[in-house]
Amino acid sequence: MSNAEGPRFALASLDELPALACPCGDARRAFADVAGAPASVHLTDIHADARTHYHRRMTEIYVVLEGEGEIELDGQRFALRPLTAVLIKPGCRHRAIGRLRILNVPIPAFDPADEWFD
């Protein structure tokens, strides 16, 4: 059975996507280019302390996969370790600190124009 609008699914092997430079290290981004996708998924290697930034529209969910460090949220620091999850709402100034590998789920799908610095 075919769908005239195209497939109703998308697959991605995060480890096979090209790493793109981001303010905190490298991100492998899936589904940001899928029309109508409600979110994207990023495998992000944080190599350096990220620069504090925020998003006006986007909510982000971070899930720490590897490493230990901290996250700064609106000026407060919290410890991060594997399997810690963080919900970051629009307007929250944030940055990751340390060497970490995270899964980042931006909602709606990532838009580089929605990354703001003070």
Image (cartoon, rainbow, N blue to C red):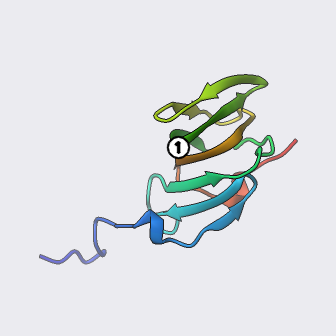
> Residue 45 occupies which quadrant of the picture?
bottom right
Q: Is residue 28 above or below residue 116?
A: below
Q: Is residue 85 above or below residue 33?
A: above
Q: Nearer the viewer, residue 57 or 75?
A: 75
The residue that disc 1 covers is 66
* Kind of residue indicated by mark 1: Glu
Residue 78: x and y, percent?
A: 66, 23
Q: Is residue 101 left or right of residue 77?
A: left
Q: Is residue 16 above or below residue 115?
A: below
Q: Nearer the viewer, residue 109 or 45?
A: 45
Q: Nearer the viewer, residue 1 or 71?
A: 71
Residue 28: x and y, percent?
A: 55, 63
Q: Quadrant of the C terminus?
A: top right
| Residue in view at x 68 percent, y 32 percent | 71
> Residue 67 occupies which quadrant of the picture?
top right
Residue 56 appears in the rendering = no
Q: Is residue 117 above or below residue 72?
A: below
| Residue in view at x 46 percent, y 34 percent | 83
